[in-house]
């Protein structure tokens, strides 16, 4: 029976077991010197990390400060995850970013935004809208062609979507949560954040076209000096002649649309695509640039939107229909009006409208 058992065990599938046994014996033989060294290694570590921790647990139970100090040192430790900074568990500078973003940036940004809204409303209440000096002539001239209006409303529409979703991201927990609660706010923000991320690059596209389209019309003109001297006549209601765009509009174009628009859209791209090796600190810096730039752009845009709607009679029609009354053109952009009437819109690039009168 024993023989037959041995025969059965020593069959063809016994050899792998014997081979494994041999391998284990060899491994033990190789590991023997290392095992022998183990007590020394334990003794060494006892003097350092583990022993120190153990001692500390006895002296100051639950106080893990040295461990956390090491974790928060910012040094890269071992990890199999590949990528920049993956060995750094905690990036302590992030706390500075968090404190800045959730503290002064949100607080002063919000206060300034409300102050700008209040100032615009007060200005409207005290001064009222800019009105025409003479009665409308009934003769219309083209101010913006179809392409210009599509680009303008594309920029304005995407900007408004970004402004609403961006404000929800920044101020939502202070304004929306107390009213609608965390659950609804959570769902709103999941949608809002994704809309914000995807609309950002579209805004950049429209902005770039707008800059190329209107750069020439926004170049410095001698009449701008007079506009600056008289503060655009905003306070006095005085008539200040200007070209296709006045100095106020030019300021909005260069500082608002060009500098801030590109800064906000560009920093947004850095945040949108974190897969180009940016480390956390880069993302934090660009986040602050993005938020502060966006808040300043939003404040300036409120002034522009005011002038484009209730602030100046007839301005909105120019961007809605593309046409303005001749009296409007003479009142607000006299030099441009004269150029158009003379059939040579001086500063205007090729696509800018020439004089074309239509029935009212
Ligand atoms: C709902 C919001 C907006 C309204 C109601 C509005 C309205 C207008 C109107 C009526 C004009 C024509 C002014 C004129 O005839 O001289 C205009 C021009 C212009 N708008 Fe807007 N706009 C809005 C948002 C925006 C936004 C978000 C941007 C850019 C980010 C923008 C950029 C411009 C530029 C660059 C001009 C030409 C002025 C210049 O180049 O100097 N607009 N807008």
Image (tube, grey):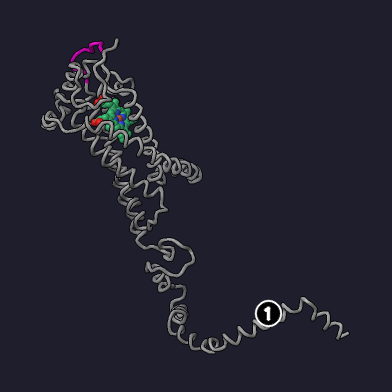
Residue that label 1 marks: 20
Give the quarter of the image for residue 144. top left
Measuring 50% from the left and 43% from the top, which residue is drawn there?
Answer: 187
Task: State the extent of the magenta-drawn residues as a range.
Answer: 131-139
Q: Quadrant of the N terminus?
A: bottom right
Quarter of the rendering occupied by the C terminus: top left
Q: Nearer the viewer, residue 309 or 351?
A: 351
Q: Is residue 208 above or below residue 244?
A: below
SS for tag 1? helix
Check the image and report above or below for 186 versus 80: above
Residue most toward the right?
A: 1
Mark 1, Cα crowd under 10 Å, few <14 / some 14-19 / many 20+, is few
The answer to whether residue 306 is visible is no
Q: Position of residue 328 (x, y in %)?
A: 22, 18
Tell me what residue is drawn at x 49 percent, y 66 percent: 80
Q: Is residue 201 visible?
A: yes
Count the numbered circles shown: 1
Residue at 21% x, 28% y: name it. Answer: 245
Report whether the residue tagged 1 is closer than 8 Å to ligand 1.
Answer: no
x then y, percent, for residue 35: 55, 87
**Is 24 placed left or right of 109 in the picture?**
right
- Specify the principal SS of the magenta part: loop
Q: Does the magenta run of residues contain 138?
A: yes
Question: Which residue is most to the front?
Answer: 12
74 vs 339, nearest the viewer: 339
Q: Quadrant of residue 33?
A: bottom right
Residue 47, placed above or below residue 285: below
- Residue closer to the observer: 299 or 358: 358
Q: Quadrant of ligand 1?
A: top left
Q: Is residue 281 magenta?
A: no
């Amino acid at each position: 029976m024993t023989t037959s058992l041995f025969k059965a065990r020593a069959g063809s599938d016994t050899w792998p077991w014997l081979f494994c046994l041999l391998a284990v014996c060899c491994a033990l033989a190789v590991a023997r010197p290392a095992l022998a060294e183990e007590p020394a290694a334990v003794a060494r570590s006892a003097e350092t990390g583990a022993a120190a921790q153990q001692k500390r647990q006895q002296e100051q139970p639950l106080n893990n400060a040295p461990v956390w100090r090491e974790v928060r040192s910012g040094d890269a430790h071992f990890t199999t995850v590949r990528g920049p900074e993956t060995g750094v568990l905690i990036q302590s500078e992030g706390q500075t970013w968090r404190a800045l973003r959730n503290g002064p940036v949100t607080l002063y940004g919000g206060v300034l935004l409300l102050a700008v809204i209040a100032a615009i409303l007060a200005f409207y209440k005290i001064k009222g809208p800019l009105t025409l000096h003479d009665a409308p002539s009934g003769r219309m001239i083209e101010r913006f062609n179809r392409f210009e209006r599509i680009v303008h409303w594309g920029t304005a529409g995407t900007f408004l979507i970004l402004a609403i979703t961006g404000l929800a991201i920044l101020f939502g927990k202070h304004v929306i949560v107390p009213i609608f609660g965390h659950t609804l706010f959570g769902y709103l923000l999941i949608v809002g954040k994704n809309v914000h991320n995807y609309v950002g690059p579209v805004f950049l596209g429209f902005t770039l076209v707008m800059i190329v389209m209107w750069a020439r019309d926004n170049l410095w003109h001698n009449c701008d000096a007079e506009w600056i001297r008289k503060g655009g006549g905003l306070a006095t209601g005085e008539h200040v002649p200007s070209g296709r765009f006045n100095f106020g509009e030019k300021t909005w174009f260069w500082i608002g649309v060009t500098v801030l628009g590109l800064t906000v859209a560009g920093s947004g791209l850095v945040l949108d695509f974190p897969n180009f090796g940016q480390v956390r600190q880069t993302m934090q810096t660009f986040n602050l640039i993005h938020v502060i730039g966006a808040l300043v752009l939003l404040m300036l845009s409120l002034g522009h939107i005011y002038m484009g709607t209730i602030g100046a009679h007839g301005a909105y029609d120019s961007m809605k229909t593309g046409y303005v009354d001749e009296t409007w053109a003479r009142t607000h952009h006299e030099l441009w009006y004269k150029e158009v009437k003379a059939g040579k819109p001086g500063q205007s690039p090729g696509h800018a409208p020439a004089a074309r009168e239509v029935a009212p």
